[in-house]
Image (spheres, rainbow, N blue to C red):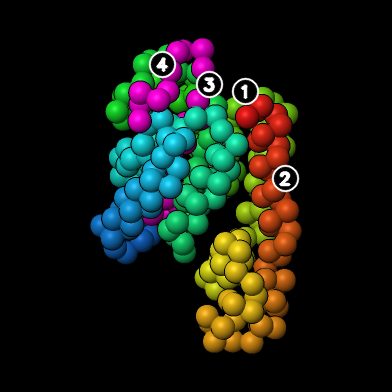
Amino acid sequence: MLARIRNRTSERYVVLTGDIVSSRQVANRAQLQARLRKLLARVNNAYRELIVVPMTISGGDEFQGVVTLHERVPAILKDLAQGLLPVQVRVGVGVGTLSTGLAARAQEMDGEAFVRSRQAVEEAKRDDARLWFVTGDGFFDLAANAISRLLWAIRESWKPLHWRRAALKDQGWTEARIARAEGVRQASISGSLAWAGHAAVRNGEASLADLWRQRLRV
């Protein structure tokens, strides 16, 4: 995996640093950590062509990994955000160079991208955000973090059924298929997605992905 990436300090990488929101309030911490390990393994496998250093637990309920500066990074962020529901995950995204060589674990590395990722996590905590960017592009950070805050403001009131139905819709399921799977009328699915503002969320996610591609030139 590491051999596919050129080890040059001038290259920009994406460091993802995450933690579990209010993890101390979760009754079964051991089970939660096991779920986190499975989530990271799934993400590492699903995006293996983009993974520079696999995402692993770095301590307690925190995790970290390094990926290439690629247009699919927003998809990775969405998978991480939804992977432990109803438990919430916070992710700080840092973009920049490395001051060390590549290593088997992100915790053995350092550099601009790591500093920015940690800064992003701390700013996300202060803002009670679930996703935060520090990339070195001030315009991108301002716009992307504003979009992320608005998306979370919409999702904050979602119940498990809204998350579940929205995820199925995002996977390409029709409302009729979701209704059959859940044993309800299609109108119930349509109504719950409309109440959740799912269309607005998808538009916001698409705008964030477009912004990522255009401003960071990926």
> How far is the residue under mark 4 from the one under mark 3?
11 Å
Q: Earlier in the sequence, mark 3 or mark 1?
A: 3
Element type at mark 4: loop
Where is mark 2, residue-wise? Answer: 207
The answer to whether residue 21 is magenta is yes
Task: Name the one closer to the observer, 172 or 42.
Answer: 172
Badge 2 local density, few (<14 within 10 Å), some, or many (20+)? some
Tag 2–tag 1 contact (CB < 8 Å) = no
Relative to 70, is 193 above or below? below
Where is mark 3, residue-wise? Answer: 12
The answer to whether residue 98 is magenta is no
As shown in the figure, which amino acid type bears the numbered disc 3?
Answer: Arg
Element type at mark 1: loop
Q: Residue at x 51, y 38 (%)?
A: 92
> How far is the residue under mark 3 from the one under mark 1?
11 Å
Q: Position of residue 179 (x, y in %)?
A: 59, 81
As shown in the figure, which amino acid type bears the numbered disc 4?
Answer: Asn
Where is mark 1, residue-wise? Answer: 136
Element type at mark 3: loop
- Residue 166 in view of the camera: no
As shown in the figure, which amino acid type bears the numbered disc 1?
Answer: Gly
Which of the 4 image quarters holds residue 209?
top right
Badge 3 local density, few (<14 within 10 Å), some, or many (20+)? some
Q: Earlier in the sequence, mark 1 or mark 4?
A: 4
Element type at mark 2: helix
